[in-house]
Image: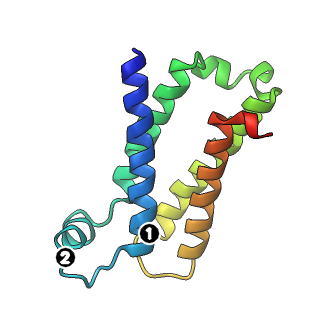
Amino acid sequence: MVLLYIAAVWIHIITVTLWIGAMFFGDPQSERFFSRLFERKLNGIGWYAQAVLWITGLFMLYYRGITLDRLFSTEFVSTHWGQLVWIKIALVLALAVLQVTVGHRPSKLVYGYILVAFAAVGVGVLLVRPIIF
């Protein structure tokens, strides 16, 4: 089970890296293989990344002993760690909304999309490295 958790963490990190990289460097006009694959054939990687991130994220919470009942309990939400988890969930839900509204289409909202993605990553770092504060 520990190896599965470590694999989930790495898959989570690599998926976030690919997704944010695609936000910055994805070019629908490019003729490179990966740009053609992700932008034209798969219509971007946002939804695929969302699916992988939700699955691995929920598994990592489960591994840490946080079931859905505990996640929604007032006892959990009242802790500092629980509040950070809920901030991250709120940011991830905001990313899902932005994925629906902005997606990979050209828009000035994409900057907000990237900002929310970075905020979600930052809160995620605080969750796994609470020793910083």
Label for residue 32? 2
Quadrant hosting residue 23: bottom left
Callout 1 environment at 10 Å: few (<14), some (14 to 19), or many (20+)? many
Q: Is residue 99 above or below residue 89?
A: below
Is residue 41 rendered to the left or right of residue 115? left
Q: Tell me, what colour scheme is on the image?
A: rainbow
Residue under pointer 1: 23
Residue depth check, mark 1 versus mark 2: number of the one nearer the observer: 2
Classify mark 2: residues with Cα within 10 Å, few (<14), some (14-19) or many (20+): few
Relative side of 115 to 8, left or right: right
Identify which residue is drawn at 62% across, 66% down.
115
Residue 46 pos. (x, y %): 39, 59
**Under tag 1, what secondary structure?**
helix
> What's under tag 1, amino acid-wise?
Met
105, 35: nearer the viewer: 35
Spot occupied by residue 82 in the image (x, y as percentages of width and height): 73, 30
Residue visible at 56% across and 82% down in the picture: 108
Whichever of callouts 1 and 2 sits on the residue coming sooner in the sequence is 1
In this view, the residue in front, 55 or 23, is 23
